[in-house]
Amino acid sequence: MNFNIRGENLKVTPPLREYTEKKISKLERYFNTPLATDVNVNMHVHNNEQVIEVTIPMQELLLRAEVAHEDMYAAIDLVAEKLERQIRKYKTKINRKSRQFHSSLKGGQLAVSGSNATYLKYDEEEEEFEVVRKKRFNLKPMNVEEAILQMDMLGHDFFVFSNAETGETNVVYRRKDGKYGLIEQES
């Protein structure tokens, strides 16, 4: 793991850096080989709370967690636990899925990717929308079930993906009744 730790309105001291690397590195025990990926850690103070955001992009999975706490060391512990739960949940679902569909998979690999969100801020005076954040990402082909799995893993309410069956860009989303919806392009 290659750590990229930065602080906003907060000095990242060597002990804080070492503690973060030690805690996040423990996640490698869930993988067969050491992770050769970047770990992006952003620490900042917001409304008297210490906030830590961790993003670990991998080929098959995007892990992301954010925690706010009065103490940064406690926030680091909590974010590591949150990431660990995501990994265990992912592995459980993959194992369950591979047992159910073993005959149809025949060595196939589940591919999931990150999600994209653009947050809009409404300006009342001008009655215009101002884009305050942009994200870019590659859409990896996957089926609807895989997209729902990734959306749940990220804790998002929607997920944009390339449908492996149709080749079109689709969106899955969580409905208010707890079920899922799918948005497809019209032909």
Image (cartoon, rainbow, N blue to C red):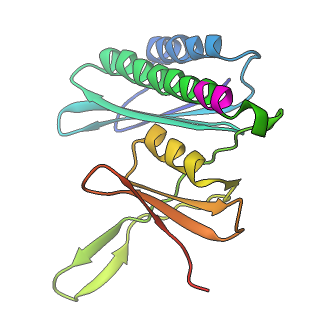
Residue 74: in magenta span: no
Q: Is residue 165 left or right of residue 183?
A: right
Left or right of residue 16: residue 39: right
Q: Is residue 99 magenta?
A: yes
Percent of width and height locating residue 130: 35, 77
The answer to whether 187 appears left or right of 151 in the picture is right
Residue farthest bottom in this picture: 126
Q: Position of residue 70 (x, y in %)?
A: 21, 23
Residue nearest the observer in this picture, 185 or 115: 185
Say which of 157 and 38 sits in front.
157
Residue sitting at x 18%, y 39%: 47
Q: Is residue 25 above or below residue 8?
A: above
At 22% from the left and 79% from the top, the residue drawn is: 123
x and y, in percent, of residue 174 in the image: 36, 54
Left or right: 97 in relation to 71: right
The stretch of residues the image draws in magenta is: 96-100
Residue visible at 44% across and 42% down?
A: 152
Q: As drawn, which residue projects farthest toward the right?
A: 107
- Given residues 130 and 6, the one toward you in this image is 130
Q: Quadrant of the N terminus?
A: top right
* Quarter of the view holding residue 25: top right
User: Residue 74 lies in what quarter of the image?
Assistant: top left
